[in-house]
Amino acid sequence: MKIPTTLKHKPVIVSENYEGVDGRYANQTDAKGLSLGLAQWNDRGKVDISAKVWRHTGDKWSRQSEELPLHRVLDLAIMVTSALTHFREAYRYKNLYDSENPIIDRIGLQGDAMTLSVCTDNERINEDIRLFSQALSDDDELIGERLRTLSRTLKELGY
């Protein structure tokens, strides 16, 4: 399915067959494509690049398609890898986290730090964190394949 080029987000690099590789949703997803392009929120003279997930209802392109600035895409990738690191050792805690210190990582970015912590405001956190951990375990092969690919491409770039 061809990604629209007449909307505010202007695709430059596209994956128009994303539905076939959308993790456990492959071939059963409304996420039909991904694109990197010029952001829809660009002002005159200012150009930002964004990543977009293109959703299609079967009849039309969905208003639930998501567009994110590239730094947020990378921040989410950082969050995923930090969460995976936490859950490798989480078995040491009764509820899969230290309730006295729920911070799992602080990542220095732009002169500050992005703090990642378990959401103790969630009244069902002990149940939800177990479900989250199980989902990570269930998707280990899917996530691992993507992380190996990301690692390979980062090494090719010199990182």
Image (cartoon, grey):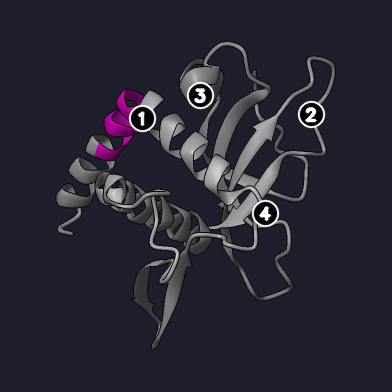
Q: SS for tag 4?
A: loop
Find residue 123 and name its label. Answer: 4
Distance, label 3 to label 1, CA atoms, is 17 Å
Few, some or many residues within 10 Å of mark 2 (<14, 14–19, 20+) = some
| Residue at the spot of label 3 | 22
Which of discs 3 and 4 lies nearer the camera? The answer is: 4
Q: Position of residue 130 (x, y in %)?
A: 47, 38
- Amino acid marked by disc 3: Asp
Which quadrant would residue 53 be assigned to in this image? top right
Where disc 2 sits, the SS reads loop
Badge 2 amino acid: Trp
**Mark 3 element type:** loop
Comparing labels 2 and 1, the label whose residue is closer to the camera: 1
Q: Which residues are magenta?
A: 139-147
Q: Nearer the viewer, mark 4 or mark 2?
A: 4
Q: Separation of disc 2 and disc 3 at Cα?
A: 17 Å
Q: Please tell me whether residue 1 is drawn above or below residue 104 in the rendered image.
A: above
Gap in angstroms between the C-alphas marked 1 and 4: 23 Å
The image quadrant that residue 159 belongs to is bottom left
Residue 137 numbered mark, or none: 1
For mark 2, what is the residue?
A: 61
